[in-house]
Image: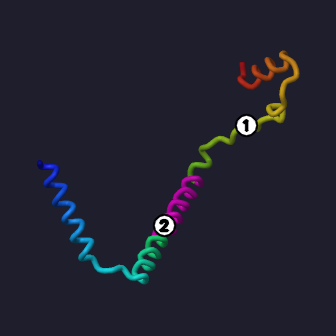
């Protein structure tokens, strides 16, 4: 009973507010769209600046990864080569 009453009141409220709402003009819709797109662009700029600053602050603390040799892309031809490559790569 309580749910049915709530549903009836919410439906009545939504239909009356939609019926009494002022019509939206194209100019107001475009201006709202422009404001939202401007805020999106501003947030992208802020995020980019924050990440750039973080990268410059964090960069000295991060060690450069060691260079992978060209042999990692070649398929070993024998089982001995495969085992040797595996032990070298995994530092066993």
Q: Quadrant of residue 70?
A: top right
- Provide residue 32's location: percent of width, then percent of height: 41, 76
Instruction: Name the residue rendered at 84%, 24% in the picture.
Output: 76
Q: Which residue is mark 1?
A: 66
- Provide residue 26's location: percent of width, then percent of height: 43, 82
State the extent of the magenta-drawn residues as a range.
39-56
Q: Quadrant of residue 5?
A: bottom left
- Provide residue 71's location: percent of width, then percent of height: 83, 31
Identify the colour scheme used: rainbow
Q: Is residue 40 magenta?
A: yes
Q: Which mark is residue 27?
A: none
Query: How would you classify the magenta stretch by its main secondary structure?
Result: helix
- Provide residue 36's location: percent of width, then percent of height: 44, 71
Alpha-carbon span between mark 1 and mark 2: 38 Å
Instruction: Name the residue rendered at 24%, 76% in the picture.
Output: 20
Q: Which residue is nearer to you in this view: 43 or 21?
A: 21
Describe the element under mark 2 as helix, strand or loop: helix
Q: Which mark is residue 40?
A: 2
Describe the element under mark 1 as helix, strand or loop: loop
For label 2, the crowd category at 10 Å Cα-Cα, with few meaning under 14, some 14 to 19 and many 20 or more, is: few
């Amino acid at each position: 009973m309580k749910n049915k009453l709530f549903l009836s009141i919410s439906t009545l409220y939504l239909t009356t507010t939609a019926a009494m709402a002022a019509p939206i003009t194209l100019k107001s819709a475009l201006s709202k769209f422009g404001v939202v797109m401007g805020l999106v662009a501003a947030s992208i700029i802020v995020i980019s600046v924050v990440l750039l600053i973080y990268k410059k602050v964090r960069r000295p603390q991060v060690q450069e990864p060691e260079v992978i040799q060209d042999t990692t892309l070649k398929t070993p031809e024998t089982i001995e080569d495969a085992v040797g490559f595996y032990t070298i790569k995994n530092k066993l």
